[in-house]
Amino acid sequence: MMFKIGNLHIKRAYYQDKVTGEYLFLLDKLLNLPKYERLSNTCIKSVIEEATDSSYKKAGEKASISAGVSKQTVKNFMHKVKVPQEIVELKKKKEARILHIVADEDHVSLQRYGKNRQKIAMPKLIMLYEGVVPDAGEGMSSKRNKVIEKFYFSGLYKGKNSHKIWERVAEYIEKTYDYEKIEKIYINGDGAAWIKAGCDFIEKSVFVLDKYHMKSAINDCVAGLEEKIQRDIKDRLYRSLRELDKREFFRLLEMSKDFLEGQKKKAAVEEKIKYLRYHWRAIEIQITDAKYLTGCCAEGQVSHVLSSRLSSRPLGWSL
């Protein structure tokens, strides 16, 4: 049997039970050795932990100091791993006035075509947290923040199953927090339908369009204008936003479209205006509730949690 410190060779006798007729190794039973298994539990654990950060081949090579195992063996172990799904209810629930949720998805290359010959998988990621605090140590100055009491939810949840991830989030909040003490839950994202659907499953929640996508849409609307006109319109746009003057905001956007030449450019800007108009309520909340919001770090979380392992390098995965 293989252990982290090397191989263990055991000579043992093979017996037949006179009552049942069963053949067995008594030493295996005494030492509680797995049947037909040549890797110890500590060795398997080490292989699985290594495979979460590196390739199956490298994980197999580090199985033991004396020898390794094949990448196929590592794959077999990985595919047997069952992630606990049960959410345990706390006896003494946490208290929080405000909760924040950020949501986004990654784009991961598949080794083989999925259904409808799709070569890309899009795992979803949701992070729930209570707030942010400065990340600087004592006596240090830093503008970086870190989230507190964070909890992740992730998986493929494709198509009609996308609601299941929100059901898990709702269940976690209910079993972890005193719901009566919660005043509002902010769901931050880029406006994708599956993200906004969270408001249908989570009580006291509202959707907030993240500033990055809002500013990106505004920049796209004025990108083709002369620099001086562009600067002037942007200043007036952000002033109308601060004043929540919806009529003036969209009047300026329509005016910027009229400055452009070419039907293709105008059509592209029209799509961005529709996007902003459709999410006006989510933009309003971003401004009126600014003192409660922490900003949206969804893309950063996807980068750290999913992309760093799954898609930042040219790798291929099974579903």
Image: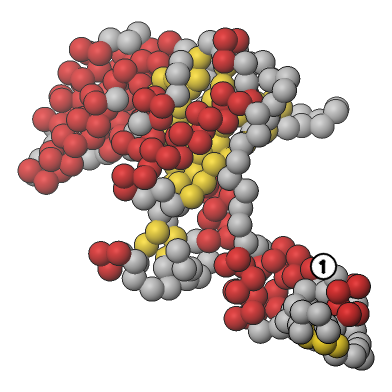
Task: Find residue 12 and report its horizontal and vertical position in percent.
Answer: 91, 89
- Residue drawn at x 60%, y 81% as measured from the top left: 72
In the foreground, 194 or 192:
194
Q: Quadrant of residue 160?
A: top left
Q: Quadrant of residue 251?
A: top left
Q: Quadrant of residue 43?
A: bottom right
Classify the position of the N terminus by image quarter.
bottom right
Task: Find residue 57 and report its horizontal and vertical position in percent.
Answer: 65, 79
Classify the position of the C terminus by image quarter.
bottom left
In the foreground, 206 or 94:
94
- Residue drawn at x 20%, y 30% as measured from the top left: 274
The amino acid type, in three-letter code, at marker 1 is Thr
Question: Which element carries disc 1, helix, strand or loop?
Answer: helix
Question: Would you place residue 306 above or below residue 301 in this image?
Answer: below
Which residue is situated farthest in the left direction here? 263
Residue 145 visible at all: no
Left or right: 302, with 140 as reference point: left
Left or right: 47, with 123 as reference point: right
Residue bearing mark 1 = 42
- Residue drawn at x 59%, y 50% as measured from the top left: 305
Task: Find residue 200 and report its horizontal and vertical position in percent.
Answer: 36, 25
The mark total stands at 1
- Residue drawn at x 64%, y 79% as measured from the top left: 73
Question: Would you place residue 297 above or below residue 304 in this image?
Answer: above
Task: Find residue 264 and report its horizontal and vertical position in percent.
Answer: 11, 46
